[in-house]
Image (cartoon, helix red, strand yellow):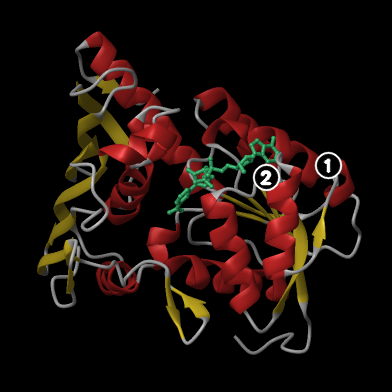
Amino acid sequence: MKSNLQKIWKAAVVGGGAFGEAHLRTYASMPQVEVAGVFTLERERGDALCHQYGGTNYQNLEALAGDESLDLVSIVTPEDRHLEAFQVLAAAGKAIYVEKPLAADLTEARAILELSRGTIAMSGHCLRFEHRLAQIFEKLSGVPKHHLSFRDRRTRQEKDTYGRVHPAYAMLCHEIELSNAFAESSFDRVMALETRISEGQVDGMTILIEYANGVTSVVEGGWYLPRQTHCIENDFVSILSKHGIDEVTLPHLGYYHLGDAGLEIPNLSYGHRIYGVEYGPLRAALDYFIHCLSEQTAPEISTVQDAFNAVELIDAAIRSASGNCWVKRE
Ligand SMILES: NC(=O)c1ccc[n+]([C@@H]2O[C@H](COP(=O)([O-])OP(=O)(O)OC[C@H]3O[C@@H](n4cnc5c(N)ncnc54)[C@H](O)[C@@H]3O)[C@@H](O)[C@H]2O)c1
């Protein structure tokens, strides 16, 4: 990563929610990036974010897209609001990092995929950059895989926000994209079951996947953990390949805090700060994107095509669950 080191890249964020702030915090930590500002629906929230991270609180999306000094923009709006921002930013010729899932339905995902062909864009599947998973990806690239297994459990209170879309879109899209990437193949057929333990949106899903190259996979998870703030992830990845078994778990039990409220297990493999500087998979993904921009090359990891492939599988899984049948890739 040695090219264009003098250039300062100006980055803005569309969507000032919890994860939009994570993008701003991360950009503000990157020495080669200047935070240009944010556009979000709540003016006061935009003011507060600009006060903390710098830049302009843009009046609307068009004002942000029209800022010719901007080099790149993160789209961090809700899952079903990515297309509208992508259209405006692609038309303005901006480089775009679009959060996962690419969209909350296949038609919109296909529209973003088409638009992305005219610009440099990357999708937000930043777990491809999680330090342990990245090691396994590099080590097992091209090595035959036999069976893959993924689990993603989050707390029930997160459903209050992300239950706005099906959990396969809101959360399992991460594991589905990882599964596709480890399989190094497109899926041939899927069978899925939904789990309901509370009112409203489905709580979770279990998906069996068979890939065209014979690899099998299971992806399961949902808003299953009790409402609490002390252990908020219960994740597992297992890769059975010709070279053996590689497994990753979350949380890390090697560090915990025991306080008045009980045992707290911080997630140090995701976003974490070291003396005020943000690190973790999002930082690594944005570093990689800036590197691609400086080289004027299209990203090869977490591409928009990868994100589209994940949505295609999610769409098949939801049709499988509602039709109670295997669904083949069309
Ligand atoms: N990669 C990850 O690990 C990860 C983690 C969390 C969230 N996400 C993704 O990030 C995105 C945002 O999630 P969040 O947790 O920040 O949600 P959120 O609900 O906290 O925030 C969404 C924000 O977008 C704003 N917004 C809505 N419509 C808008 C529009 N048309 N134009 C501009 N702003 C608009 C809202 O005002 C709100 O501030 C989602 O796609 C989510 O799936 C990714």
Residue 186, image x, y percentages: 35, 41
Quadrant in which the N terminus is drawn: bottom right
Q: Identify the amino acid type marked 2.
A: Ser
Question: Which of the labelled discs sits on residue 116, or is there none?
Answer: 2
Q: Is residue 4 left or right of residue 235?
A: right
Q: Is residue 327 above or below residue 136?
A: above
Residue 23 rendering spot, x and y as whole percentages: 58, 61
120 versus 324 height, above or below: below
What residue is rendered at 66% in x and 84% in y?
A: 31
Query: Foreground residue, 307 or 278?
Result: 278
Determine the secondary structure under disc 1. loop
Outermost residue toward the front in this view:
260
SS for callout 2: helix
The numbered disc on residue 60 is 1
Image location of residue 184, percent across then percent down: 32, 53
- If the image is split into quadrants, where does the C terminus sit? top left
- Of pointers 1 and 2, the one earlier in the residue sequence: 1
330 to 83, vertically: above or below: above
Q: Residue at x 73, y 48 (%)?
A: 44
Tally of numbered tags: 2
In the image, 272 versus 31, the foreground residue is: 272
Image-based side of 242 in relation to 329, left or right: left
Answer few, some or many: residues within 10 Å of disc 1's Cα (few below 14, many 20 plus, some between 14 and 19): some
Q: Amino acid at mark 1?
A: Asn
